[in-house]
Amino acid sequence: MKDKVYLYLGEELARYGFGDDHPFGPDRMATFWAEAQRRKLDIRVTLQSPANASNEEISRFHGSDYIRRVKRQSRDGRGYLDHGDTPAFVGIYEAAACVVGTTLAAVGSIMEGSCRRAFVPIAGLHHARPDSAAGFCVFNDCGVAIQTLLDLYAIERVAYVDIDAHHGDGIYYTYAGDPRVIIVDLHEDGHYLYPGSGHSHEAGSGTAVGTKLNIPMAPGAETEQFIAAWEQAEAFLEQMQPQFIIFQCGADSIAGDPITHLRYTPACHAHATSRLCAVAERHSDGRLLALGGGGYDRRNLALAWSAVLEHLCDNHRRADE
C-alpha cells in the first residue's frame, strides 16, 4: 500500500458545507471526484474512509469553551459561529470533527508508514482560531495536525505551505512564535482580500523570526507571477529542511473564483505539488499531506485538485522507480 497515494473520500466528509446557496457547499467533493475519475485517477490511488476526531484530539488546538459552544449550536443549528461567514447548522460539530479526524487519519497513515503521500479534499480549514470560527472554518484541522506532529510524533520542523487565495491567519498567528513551525504562504494581498493579513513583514516573532514567509500577490496575478514567486518559496523551504510538509492547496486562486481576484490556472497547483514532492523527497522522507482548502467555482476546484492528485501520483511513481 505504501506505493499508493491515499485519498480520503466519503459522505461524512462531504457533509461539511453550509447549504447549496453558500460558497462552501456540500457538493464540492463530488465535483472534484467526478473530474478525478474522468482522468482515471481513481485507479491510481488507495481510497480511505473518513474518521471522526475525539474531543481530546480537537482540544490539541482548540479551547474547551469554544468546543462546547460549537456543540451547543450544533444541537439547535441557529446563529453564526463567527461574525457572519460561518453559520451553524444541526450536526455542524460532527461534520467539523470529521474533517479533523480525517486529516489526523492521513497524518497517522503517513507517519506510521502505510503511505508517504495523502490528499484530503474537504479539509484545510485554516482560518479557525483556537477560540473561534472564521471564514467558513469551524475547527482548524491544519492546526490540529501540526500540534499532533509536534506533540505525538516529536517532529521538530513541520512545514505548512499554503497557496489558497486567502492568508492562513489561523495558522500564522497561532504559531508566529514557534520556530518548529515553518510557514510559507502565497496569497492575495491582504489590502484587497479577507482576512487582511499576511503582509511580507510578518515573518514570525521572538525566537521564530525568520521561520515564516508570507508572499502577498497583487490582485490579478497570473500563473507567470506565481511560478516566479514559487522560486522564493521553494528556496526558503530548502533552507529550513522540514521533516513533514502540510500543503493547503486552496483552489480559490484560480481565475474566475467568485470571491477572490487572482487569475492563476491549475498549472500553478500542478507546479507547486510537483516541486513539493521533490522537497519532501530530499528532506521529509517523502512525507507530504495535501488538504483541499478553499475554492468556490466548482469547475476550478475540480481541475486544481485533480492536478494536485495527479502530480502526487506521478511524482510518487518516479520516486519509487
Image: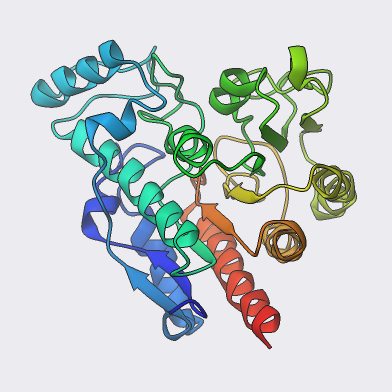
Residue 9 image-quadrant placement: bottom left
Task: From the top left corner, tell me how far across and down residue 145 is, in percent.
Answer: 46, 40
Give the residue at x 14% y 18%. Answer: 72
Q: Is residue 40 visible?
A: yes
Seen as rendered, the residue at the extreme front is 154
Q: Is residue 70 left or right of residue 143?
A: left
Task: From the top left corner, tell me how far across and down residue 246 is, in percent.
Answer: 58, 48
The N terminus - image quarter? bottom left
Q: How many marks?
A: 0
Q: In this view, does 174 lie to the left or right of 229?
A: left
Q: In this view, does 134 lie above or below 12?
A: above
Give the residue at x 89% y 50%. Answer: 231
Give the residue at x 26% y 52%. Answer: 51
Seen as rendered, the residue at the extreme bottom is 321
Which sits in the foreground, 280 or 252?
280
Q: In this view, does 285 lie above or below 173?
A: below
Which sits in the foreground, 135 or 319?
319
Q: Is residue 56 left or right of residue 315?
A: left
Task: From the top left corner, tell me how far across and down residue 292 is, in percent.
Answer: 50, 51
The C terminus - image quarter? bottom right
Task: From the top left corner, tell me how far across and down residue 254 is, in percent.
Answer: 65, 50
Residue 313 image-quadrant placement: bottom right
